[in-house]
Image (spheres, rainbow, N blue to C red):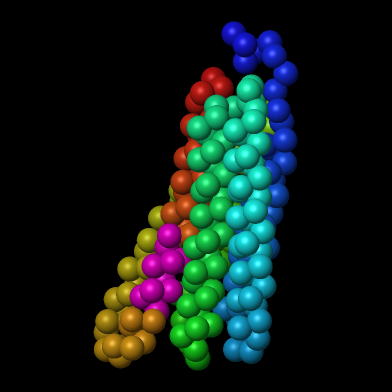
């Protein structure tokens, strides 16, 4: 009853927008990192700076949640969505750090495919998150979520192929390096799917 009567704090949607935009900037930088042999250390530092910005946004949004009595959507959904958006930045940053720290010379084709999938996931999630504020475009939001699930399935296939090829090549050090990088990229895609699932949950609760 109170949720429909009392004023709500809508600033949360601004945090969602800022955080997915930061994730987009990070994914763009990572894709750039995959396509060039120079400046990887510098790009990794830029990604780290953006990841720290995401941490700051997450903390500020959580602080606001503690102080807000009436929220526009369920409190747990806000908290979980913010944490997953921040975790997405964390995972891409972790992959970028490993590419730079491990002094990887040749970028694997699967890594480029993975980074493109992450970028595509974030692009459609940006649309879905933008539409969350008024929920007038529920069908479009659901289509965005469906697309993320499809992209996650593609990422699974890429990961299997990438790991299989590494084992066949038989270079142990290369296997160890790239397995860690691919695992971080897989987790980034998983975070995108988690975000899509949270958005779907919000739509169900609003029905």
Give the extent of the magenta segment. Answer: 178-187
The verdict on residue 55 being magenta is no
Residue 181 counted in the magenta span: yes
Q: In what quadrant of the picture does the C terminus appear?
A: top right
Look at the picture and state if 127 lies above or below 142. Answer: below
Query: Residue drawn 61% across and 69% down?
Result: 48
* Residue 151 shows in this picture: no
Residue drawn at (61%, 48%), measured in percent from left and top?
58
Quarter of the image where the N terminus is located:
top right
Q: Is residue 6 left or right of residue 173?
A: right
Residue drawn at point x = 49 percent, y = 89 percent: 103
Q: Position of residue 158 (x, y in %)?
A: 40, 68
Residue 119 in the image: state x and y as whole percent: 59, 61
Q: Is residue 87 visible?
A: yes
**How many numbered circles does the render carry?**
0
Instruction: Name the one closer to the observer, 15 or 202.
Output: 15
Left/right placement of residue 65 relative to residue 205 reads right
Front residue of 178/58: it is 58
Report the predominant secondary structure element of the magenta stretch: helix
């Amino acid at each position: 009853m109170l949720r429909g009567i009392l004023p709500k704090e809508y600033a949360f949607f601004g945090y969602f927008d800022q955080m997915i935009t930061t994730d987009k900037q990070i994914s763009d930088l990572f894709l750039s990192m995959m396509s060039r042999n120079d400046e990887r250390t510098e790009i990794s530092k830029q990604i780290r700076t953006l990841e720290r910005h995401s941490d700051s946004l997450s903390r500020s949004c959580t602080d606001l949640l503690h102080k807000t009595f009436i929220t526009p959507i369920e409190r747990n959904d806000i908290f979980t969505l913010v944490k997953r958006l921040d975790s997405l930045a964390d995972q891409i940053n972790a992959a970028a750090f490993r590419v730079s720290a491990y002094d990887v010379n040749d970028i694997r084709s699967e890594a480029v495919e993975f980074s493109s999938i992450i970028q595509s996931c974030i692009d459609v999630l940006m649309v879905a998150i933008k539409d969350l504020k008024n929920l007038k475009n529920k069908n479009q939001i659901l289509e965005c979520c469906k697309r993320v699930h499809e992209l996650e399935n593609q990422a699974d296939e890429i990961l299997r192929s990438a790991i299989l090829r590494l084992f066949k090549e038989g270079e142990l050090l290369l296997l160890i390096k790239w397995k860690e990088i691919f695992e971080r990229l897989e987790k980034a895609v998983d975070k995108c799917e988690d975000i899509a699932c949270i958005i779907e949950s919000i739509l169900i609760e609003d029905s």
